[in-house]
Image: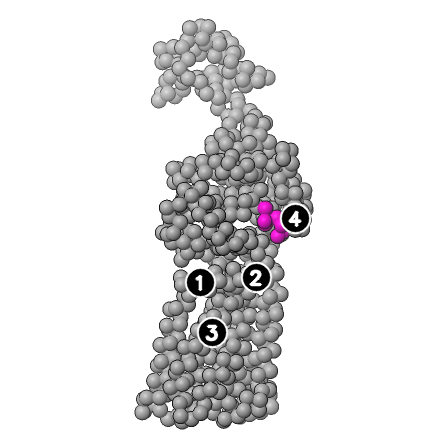
Amino acid sequence: MVVAERELRDLWLAGRGLPLLLAYTLLLSATSYLVAANQALNFLEQREAVSLTLQVAVAVGALLVLLGAADSVSGERERGTLESLLLSPAPRRALIIGKGSAALSLWAAAWAVSVPYVWYLGRGVGVVGVAVASSLVVGSLLAVFLSGYGLLISTIASSNRLSLSVSLFALLALYAPTQMPTAVQNSWIGELLLRVDPFTAGLRYLGKLVINGHSPGQDAGWLIGPVVAAAIAAAVALLVADRLTLHGGDQA
Amino acid sequence: MPGALALQARDLRKSYRGVVAVESLDLEVEAGTVLGFLGPNGAGKTTVIRMLSTILRPDAGWFAVAGVPHDQPVEIRRRVGVLPESAGYPPGQTGEEWLTFHAELFGRTRDDAHATARRLLAEVGLAERGGSLISGYSRGMRQRLGIARALINDPQVVFLDEPTLGLDPSGQLQVLELVWRIAREHGVTVVVSTHLLAEVEQACDRVLILNRGRIVAQGTVAEVASRAAAPRRGLVKVPPEFHSRALEVLAASDMAAVAGDRDHRDELLLSMPAGVAPDKGASLALSRLLAAGVPVLGFAMEGGRLSDAFLTVTEDR
């Protein structure tokens, strides 16, 4: 708890939390404005507008979590502040959990910011409740997955640049299936890929609930990928936490 | 507990990707000792400190700190305080916040952690600046803050890795005086790595010199200095008008002496005869000069100081 509290204070009172959230809010405002108010671009029906905004909110919120997690350990290494943490008797896992908590708080804040936009865009078509709840579930699963993944890379990376590069590359790879041609996406292998990829699976689930009006249980199978990915990433990050070293890489 | 060992190490080894950093290190340091830990850059000092403070795992060997064996790293961390080399500090926190956080990491309650942080800030002379952001601290203030952090858990052994690095001469003296004061007042074992040999000579009980990962000299300052580099030359200052006379007297005493250069006409360089102990040779030369009526304005032995010993034992072998 001591580490988590310190990390949260550092992130939100003295760190990059507020500037990142401001940038996120500006992006969400621009997106919402374009889908809701611009007559030339507003070709979406209301449910699709809500879904698009949610997808932007979840995707960018997850990106913030990934950036926070990927910088957490390797950044401390480069700033020379990791050694004094490692010299304390606090368990290594407590250090990682504290840093993970701070990274996850970025998603919590991003989700809270998205709620009024969803309410504004979705009012009148009975989609606000399900949109807010499903984005919380999907976004939280993706945030846990990316937080665990970012922490894992940051723990073992020998430099902060390497940690951020590998993390962002992985995020781009996770987005890649959305760019597949529709025919490929509709094939069995395409659907398998979309379901296994926690990012595409989560966003598909959101779309089915918000656009198609399905019940949460009807397409719960799409959540298997995000749930499994979140569980594995968190477990591996905690396991590797025990091997947290001053230098990272193989210089234990 | 006089005689108790604060540090013990047997055959400690560490390599980085095949490059040997520390090789077969054996060490015993009694509790309460102030140990000067010396060596040229890259000698392995930081690696040894990091192994003994459980930050690095040795490839082989055994060690114990404050009686706790190396296979209990958490217990060792509870008993040691460390000022790491090139330590970083979070610029967005105040000194008091940072110390309080570290005190809590060692299990202190919030109130106790605050009280400890304030006490230590006062002890290192930062009481007035404890509420300021660390980003506004000078390098010397950061080093003092780091020393305060090293004391946050009332350690039995304190490792200070280059506490004077990057400080101006006045800052170096301030930090070293703080270190000696803390060693006296807290009664802890202090291992201090520094290049300020004159200060180490004055304030350390014992010295250990490391070169290329191996201990090349250890003992009291006097032992190391005398063993490693026996003095062989003396510098005698006489009035210029007694220059020739002094040379004659010394030649008659089987002392090889030469005059100083043009800029140092009042100096004579005196070589000790082989087989004569340096202190006896010096006494003999001075007594002969005085007996012959040559006023001696100054005398100094060249060699025999810790800095000479350091240079001797760290030469490439």
Q: Residues within 10 Å of mark 2 (few under 14, many from 20)?
A: some
| Between discs 1 and 2, the one toward the N terminus | 1
User: Label 4 vs label 3: CA separation?
Assistant: 41 Å
**Labels 1 and 2 in the same subunit:** yes
SS label for mark 4 = loop
Identify the mark at residue A9; answer none if there is no mark: 1
Q: Whole-percent x and y of residue B65?
A: 63, 44
Amino acid type of the residue that numbered disc 3 sits on in the rendered structure: Trp
SS label for mark 2 = helix
Identify the mark at residue B70; answer none if there is no mark: 4
Q: Which residue is mark 3?
A: A107
Q: Residues within 10 Å of mark 1 (few under 14, many from 20)?
A: some
Identify the mark at residue A94; answer none if there is no mark: 2
Pointers 4 and 3 in contact (CB under 8 A)?
no
Q: Residue furthest front?
A: B111
Pointers 1 and 2 in contact (CB under 8 A)?
no
The chain to which mark 1 is attached is A
- Of the pair A109 and A230, the residue shown nearer to us: A109
SS label for mark 1 = helix
**Labels 3 and 2 in the same subunit:** yes
Amino acid type of the residue that numbered disc 4 sits on in the rendered structure: His
**Labels 4 and 3 in the same subunit:** no
Give the magenta part as a residue range: B73-79
